[in-house]
Amino acid sequence: CGPQSAGKSSVIRRISGVALPEASTLCTRIATMVQMRRASDSAIRVTLLGPGGETLSDESFDDPKDVQAAVKRAQLTALARSPGKEFVDDHIVQVKVCGKDRPNVTLVDLPGFHTANDDDTKTVNAMVQRYVEMPGTLALHVIKGDQDYGSMLGNDFMRKVPTQDTPRVTVLTHCDKLDHA
């Protein structure tokens, strides 16, 4: 979790090798779960799950380069099914990547915290809260290294989550933009 445009999707790409849609503006609008599993055969599948776990779309690929476009299509489908919403909390994009060299780990890309004080902010905060409180969660708190840590969006949110329940690692991004003077 972290502020909007902090580089959360980029961090997940670097860890998993799976490219998700990335942009310097609003990008992740629904939870995107990247499930990596060790298996003898390689397989890649992108599934959009709707309310109640209903399968709304399901695509299989051989080439990891196809994942980014499939995730974008799934996000657009979820948004189209939720008119008037900027963020959708009752759908999930599930990316399952299997292979001999894959660890058994699941990463979840979530929408970022933003400054508006509206229903979208409440939706995002509730979504992040739901995933952060899941048993076995290690929260990656992704923040821009070129901004003041104390004033970063999401810090107050993360401070309220007990560390004994949800351990966390803070990941600094955008460090190449630091002023070295």
Image (cartoon, grey):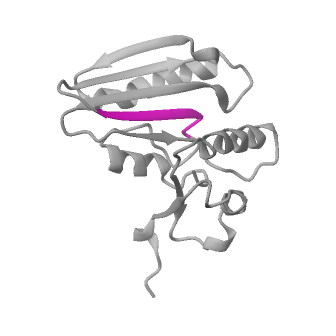
User: What residue is rendered at 48% in x and 44% in y?
Assistant: 23
For residue 85, which quarter of the picture? Answer: top right
Q: Residue furthest bottom?
A: 181
Foreground residue, 138 or 111?
138
- Look at the image and tell me in which quarter the C terminus lies: bottom left
User: What residue is rendered at 66% in x and 39% in y?
Assistant: 130
Q: Residue furthest right?
A: 118
The answer to whether residue 110 is above or below residue 159 is above
The answer to whether residue 37 is above or below residue 43 is below
Q: Is residue 141 left or right of residue 84?
A: left
Q: Is residue 70 left or right of residue 29?
A: left
The answer to whether residue 169 is above or below residue 10 is below
User: What residue is rendered at 38% in x and 31% in y?
Assistant: 68
The answer to whether residue 144 is above or below residue 119 is below
x, y percent for residue 170: 51, 64
x, y percent for residue 92: 55, 26
User: What residue is rendered at 41% in x and 52% in y?
Assistant: 11
Foreground residue, 39 or 6?
39
Q: Is residue 107 left or right of residue 147?
A: left
What span is colored magenta in the figure?
A: 27-37
Residue 1 within the magenta-colored segment of the rendering? no
- Magenta-highlighted stretch: main secondary structure? strand
x, y percent for residue 7: 48, 53
Number of disc labels: 0
Residue 32 within the magenta-colored segment of the rendering? yes
x, y percent for residue 113: 66, 50
